[in-house]
Image (tube, rainbow, N blue to C red):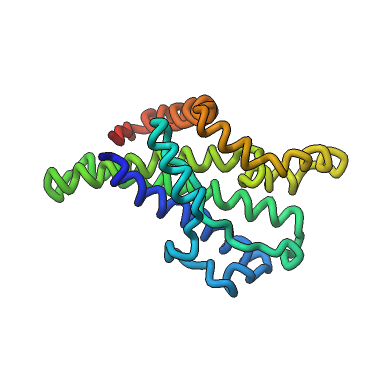
Amino acid sequence: MEWIVQLPVLFFSVIAHEFAHGFTAYKRGDDTAYLSGRLTLNPLPHIDLIGTVVLPLISIFNKLPVIGWAKPVPVNPYRLYNSRKDMALVALSGPASNFLLALVSAVFYKIFLSFGFLGYDLTSTLLMAFGFGVIINLALGIFNLMPVFPLDGSQILMGILPDKWLAVYEKHIPYGMFIILFMVITGVIKYIIFPVVIFALWLLAQIGIVITAG
């Protein structure tokens, strides 16, 4: 029943991801997310049927890292100081927040593994939660950096591509969601995410943090 631990970790992680988008946009001149009540860690305004419910369940069923997304925060690029470059920065802040959460989770995992001062049952649950915090956030960060619309990787590319390539790249936008669902349902996604997650876990092991979530 590991999903009982995984789902709350996922929900917090995707909400933090969207909060990072909204906060970065706010700092770059756009208060749309703030005015619409989305600059909050309250989960209710962020729930998305596909990204927060359906996709995580498909991931669990296919024995993949539990991935998903929350309802995207509204961002008005015309209110940003530099619409294209700042939109890329806003997009990058989401995966960056996941990588930061993965690092923080790894540190707390190491602390509780080393001391275990809360009793066996509670310590074991916290180790599982922080272990999943590392793996899920790494997977989310990598997943969202894929250059497929509407993932953050596509927004980053649209912010930095030269105009002559931008028009070509944007032709995939109507099919982006279908591409993502196809990769998840068929399991193709694991061949993209797993190698990078394993490499990141290996790097953590080199500094003495060995993660075992299950």
Q: Residue 16: image x %, image y %?
A: 47, 56
Q: Residue 206 lies in what quarter of the image?
A: top left
130 left or right of 49?
left
Q: At 74% across and 53% down in the image, what residue appears?
A: 85
Q: Residue 135: image x %, image y %?
A: 40, 38
Q: At 68% across and 51% down in the image, what residue appears?
A: 88
Q: Nearer the viewer, residue 167 or 86?
A: 167
Q: Residue 66: image x %, image y %?
A: 42, 40
Residue at the extreme left:
119
Q: Is residue 162 above or below residue 84?
A: above
9 left or right of 147?
left
Q: Is residue 13 above or below residue 162?
A: below
Residue at the extreme bottom:
35
161 left or right of 31?
right
Q: At 64% across and 47% down in the image, what residue appears?
A: 150
Q: Give the tally of numbered discs.
A: 0
| Quarter occupied by the C terminus | top left
Q: At 62% across and 42% down in the image, what residue appears?
A: 177
Q: Nearer the viewer, residue 198 or 6?
A: 6
| Quarter occupied by the N terminus | top left
82 left or right of 64?
right
Q: Residue 199: image x %, image y %?
A: 46, 27
